[in-house]
Image (cartoon, grey):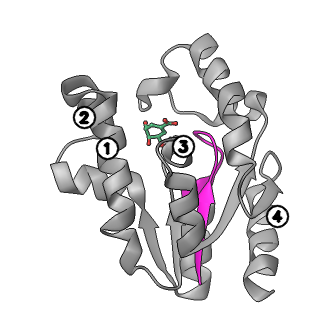
């Protein structure tokens, strides 16, 4: 069964996903990297040159193309992925969706400035954070990801064993 990590930007999805995949010898799939490879462009350039709608469409298509063929993978999704189209329902059909829940203060500290087009302005990012909570909460599981990420790894391992 796939484990699909969702949550706001900088909540630890990629970090935790890479640790889990290494430890359990499972394939790691990162939806942002798939899109970057497909268009041979960084996410921030896709946003700048093609616009957000184009990116959301590409993100949606990734589910029915690449992700559909994943089995026993650790999948890290872009922060907005579950909140557009019927993506959350689609994701829930292909694996256990785990929400890494993080408070905004922790996110602010973790975020690397300049790499995320939707985190250029802190106020706007906070509004987005609040708006998206309801969507993330539809996940199968919810884990407090504000704490040490090694503890988050342990909690996901518990889910994997169940
Ligand atoms: C986005 C999050 C980013 C990336 C894009 C849009 C979002 O991924 O997909 O910049 O809408 O929250 P991370 O969650 O890995 O930062």
Mark 1 vs 3: CB contact within 8 A: no
Question: Which residue does the image show at 39% across and 62% down from the upper left?
Answer: 63
Query: Which stretch did the figure color magenta?
Result: 1-14
Look at mark 1 in the image and give the residue it sits on: 57
Residue 160 vertical position relative to residue 53 in the rendered view, above or below = below
Q: Can residue 75 be seen?
A: yes
How crowded pointer 1 is (Cα within 10 Å; few <14, some 14-19, many 20+) is rated as few
Q: Residue at x 75, y 48 (%)?
A: 137
Secondary structure of the residue carrying tag 3 is loop
Where's residue 29, x and y in %? Answer: 43, 68
First reached walking from the N terminus: tag 2 or tag 4: 2
Q: Which residue is mark 4?
A: 151
Which mark, by number, is residue 79?
A: 3
The mark found on residue 131 in the picture is none
- In the displayed structure, 67 sits above or below 5; it is below
- The residue that mark 2 highlights is 46
Which dot, 1 or 2, sits closer to the camera? Answer: 1
Which residue is at a point 40% across and 70% down the rendered structure image? 67
Distance (Cα) linking label 4 and label 3? 21 Å
Q: Is residue 93 above or below residue 129?
A: below
């Amino acid at each position: 069964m796939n484990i699909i990590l969702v949550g706001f930007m900088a909540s630890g999805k990629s970090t935790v996903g890479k640790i889990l995949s290494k430890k359990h010898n499972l394939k790691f799939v990162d939806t942002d990297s798939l899109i970057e490879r497909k268009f041979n462009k960084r996410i921030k350039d896709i946003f700048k040159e093609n616009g957000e709608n184009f990116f959301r469409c590409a993100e949606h298509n990734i589910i029915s193309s690449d992700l559909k063929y994943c089995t026993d993978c650790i999948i890290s999704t872009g922060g907005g992925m579950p909140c557009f189209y019927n993506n959350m329902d689609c994701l829930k059909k292909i694996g256990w969706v785990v929400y890494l829940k993080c408070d905004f203060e922790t996110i602010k500290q973790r975020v690397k400035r300049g790499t995320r087009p939707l985190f250029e302005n802190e106020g706007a990012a906070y509004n987005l954070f609040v708006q998206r909570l309801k969507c993330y909460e539809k996940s199968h599981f919810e884990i407090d990801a504000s704490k040490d990420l090694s503890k988050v790894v342990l909690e996901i391992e518990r889910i994997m064993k169940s």
